Each structure stands twice: as structure tokens, then as C-alpha cells.
């Protein structure tokens, strides 16, 4: 795990907790093996910085680095000034509090309550980064999936590209014909900060199965999800409960391809140029699946969610996707041409 220039010895973090993670507690946690410990939150109110409580929280004497300080507030210039103040006191990493659920914090619209105001939260993040970047200090942000159980808006911040996009890092591996998957090389490309999505662009179901078997032992460790081409529906092992434990596998079903769209005709021309013959239906489907998966991931962080009907990703097949309900409960998304299937631990569901 690495945060900016700081390589951490492990991924065991001591989260910032007011009244708990004071300096002696952090030092003890580090002595017992924690790789990283964040201070109690420090207010952005300048008039309180000289108070006994805040001055104690800003004291890092004898503490091993990297020194991480969490700041809290609801005003962007004040938060930027608080970041600079704490850097002067020895902070090497600044963390923004957007996750605290305590009433006394949320009543002031700070902590997790700040997630209700996406525009303000983004302004704060940008201001803090602008204050820290010239001094080489990385910025992290503690947040929740949403400000309440029914409002899961965390991914909205990454769509705005405040700090980095999510997942934000794409890497590709080319496997030569007749070759095999080098799992060590693949692991080097995995960003352990996030769960990892692999788009397996293989049309041969037997080869797809072999690669899935190679990936399976690493699924839980790296949070792997795998998106396969439509041909993988021929793999019978998906329905076995003990075959790919803890590794969700997705694929589209076979569907009709419109071959007279400009995109389809382009694929036809390029394939003929390279292969000397017209492409089979599966070539179109494989190319489109790869395009569909990758672009939804890039824009929304995950391929299949409430944004699956985004028409900006219409490519070959007209995605007129609607939600299918049974007794008022959404069961799956349906398109005249396309179904998306998810297998996990042998259980099949429609996405």
C-alpha cells in the first residue's frame, strides 16, 4: 500500500476516532503492527487551534511517520488554511473528514452530513489539495457509501474527477496465441486500493474457463470481478457452487447484431483486411461487449448499475434497456437483444 511518496508496511489502518486515537493510542497501535494511524480530527476553526484539546491533537512528538492528520469543517478556505496549519505542525498526510456520523459533527453539516452537499464537498477537496500539493503532501478522504442508508452517492464524487477518477487506472495485458496467463505479471497491474475488475476479452470458452481457474484463487485477496464475452455462456461450470468461490462472473447472452451501422461496417472492413474473410457474428458481439463493459466502468466505476441504460454507449446494438419488475420488485434489466447474467458461487442472477 502506498499513499503519495509513503510506502506503508501493511494495509492495517487505525481510523481516526475522536476521543480514542490520541497520540499514545496511535503509538501503541504502531508498536503492535499497524501500518498507518490517523490522528483525531482537528477543527478548521482557527480560533480553537490554541485550545488545549486542539493543541494536544496537533502534537506529534515521538510519533513514527508518516504523520496523518484529519481535518474537519464546512468552509473550503478554512479547510485549506487548516491543512496548511497542520502541515506546519508536522503533518505529512492530510485526511478530510466526510464520514463521521456523530450528531455534534453532523449538526454542523460536517462529517458524513457533508456528503449531502456534493458541490461544497468538491470545493473543499479541491481547496485542500491546492493547499497541500505545492508542499508535496498527499490528501486522503474518509467517507461513507452515502450520507444515509437510502442515499448511496459516494461514486458521484469520483465522476466529478476531484482527485482521481474511480477506478481511474486501466491496464491491459496481451496474451499471444497459444500462450497462458502470467498471474505474477497480472498481479503487478492490480491496484489494491480498489476492488479489481478484469475484462476477459476471449471468445474461446475453453480458454476462458482455463483463465478463470487461474484467477479464482486470487479472487478474495484482490476483490476480483470478471466480465467475460458472450461465448462464455457455454461454460457449464458457472453453475457449480465450488468452482469459482468468491469471484463474481458476468457475461452477456447471445444477441442479434445490427450489421449495417457505421461501427459494424468498420469492424467488417478491418477484420477482412486482417483475416481475409468476413467476421462471424461472435466477432461483433465480442468487440461490443468489451466496449460496453470498459466504458461503463470508466464512467461509473462499475459496469452494471442504475446507469446501464446510458445511451452514450449505444454502439452496435440499440440498448433500450428497461427494468423488469415482478410484484413491484425490480428483478433485472431487459433489452430486446441483450441480457446480462451474473454468477456468484454457482448462483445465477440477472443484472
Image (cartoon, rainbow, N blue to C red):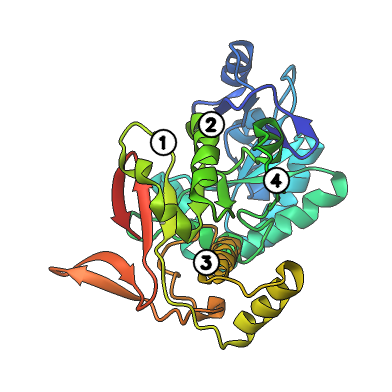
Dot in front, 2 or 3: 3
Write the residue at 55% across / 33% down: 214
Res 315 → quadrant? bottom right
Q: Disc 1 designates what residue? A: 244
Q: Note whether residue 90 is visible.
A: no
Quarter that holds the C terminus: bottom left
Mark 1, secondary structure of its residue: loop
Dot in front, 2 or 4: 4
Q: How many marks?
A: 4
Q: Among all residues in the image, which is located at the extreme left?
A: 327
Q: Residues within 10 Å of mark 1 (few under 14, many from 20)?
A: many
Q: Disc 3 designates what residue? A: 282
Dot in front, 3 or 1: 3
The numbered disc on residue 175 is: 4
Lower sequence index among marks 2 and 3: 2
Mark 4, secondary structure of its residue: loop
Q: Disc 2 designates what residue? A: 218
Quarter that holds the N terminus: top right
Lower sequence index among marks 4 and 1: 4
Amino acid at each position: 500500500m502506498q499513499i503519495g511518496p509513503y510506502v506503508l508496511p501493511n494495509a492495517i489502518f487505525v481510523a481516526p476516532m475522536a476521543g480514542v486515537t490520541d497520540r499514545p493510542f496511535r503509538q501503541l497501535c504502531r508498536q503492535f503492527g499497524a501500518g498507518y494511524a490517523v490522528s483525531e480530527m482537528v477543527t478548521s476553526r482557527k480560533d480553537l487551534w490554541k485550545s488545549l484539546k486542539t493543541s494536544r491533537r496537533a502534537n506529534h512528538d515521538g510519533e513514527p511517520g508518516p504523520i496523518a492528520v484529519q481535518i474537519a469543517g464546512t468552509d473550503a478556505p478554512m479547510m485549506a488554511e487548516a491543512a496548511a496549519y497542520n502541515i506546519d505542525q508536522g503533518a505529512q498526510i492530510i485526511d478530510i473528514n466526510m464520514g463521521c456520523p456523530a450528531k455534534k459533527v453532523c449538526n454542523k453539516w460536517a462529517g458524513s452530513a457533508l456528503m449531502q452537499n456534493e458541490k461544497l464537498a468538491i470545493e473543499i477537496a479541491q481547496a485542500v489539495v491546492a493547499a497541500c500539493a505545492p508542499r508535496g503532501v498527499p490528501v486522503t478522504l474518509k467517507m461513507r457509501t452515502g450520507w444515509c442508508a437510502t442515499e448511496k452517492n459516494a461514486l458521484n464524487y469520483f465522476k466529478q474527477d476531484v482527485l482521481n477518477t474511480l477506478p481511474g487506472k486501466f491496464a491491459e495485458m496481451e496474451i499471444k496465441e497459444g500462450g497462458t496467463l502470467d498471474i505474477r505479471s497480472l498481479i503487478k497491474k492490480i491496484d489494491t486500493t480498489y476492488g479489481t475488475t478484469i475484462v476477459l476479452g476471449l471468445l474461446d470458452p475453453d480458454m476462458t474457463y482455463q483463465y478463470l481457474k487461474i484467477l479464482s484463487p486470487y479472487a478474495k485477496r484482490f476483490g476480483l470481478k470478471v466480465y467475460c464475452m458472450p461465448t462464455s455462456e457455454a461454460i457449464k461450470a458457472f453453475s457449480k457452487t465450488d468452482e469459482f468461490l468468491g469471484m463474481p462472473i458476468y457475461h452477456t447472452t447471445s444477441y442479434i447484431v445490427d450489421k449495417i451501422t457505421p461501427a459494424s461496417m468498420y469492424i467488417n472492413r478491418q477484420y477482412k483486411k486482417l483475416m481475409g474473410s468476413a467476421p462471424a457474428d461472435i466477432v461483433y458481439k465480442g468487440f461490443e461487449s468489451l466496449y460496453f463493459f470498459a466504458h461503463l466502468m470508466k464512467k461509473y466505476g462499475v459496469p452494471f448499475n442504475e446507469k446501464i441504460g446510458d445511451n452514450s454507449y449505444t454502439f452496435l446494438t440499440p440498448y433500450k434497456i428497461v427494468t423488469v419488475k415482478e410484484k413491484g420488485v425490480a428483478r433485472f434489466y431487459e433489452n430486446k437483444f441483450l441480457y446480462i447474467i451474473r454468477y456468484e458461487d454457482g448462483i445465477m442472477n440477472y443484472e
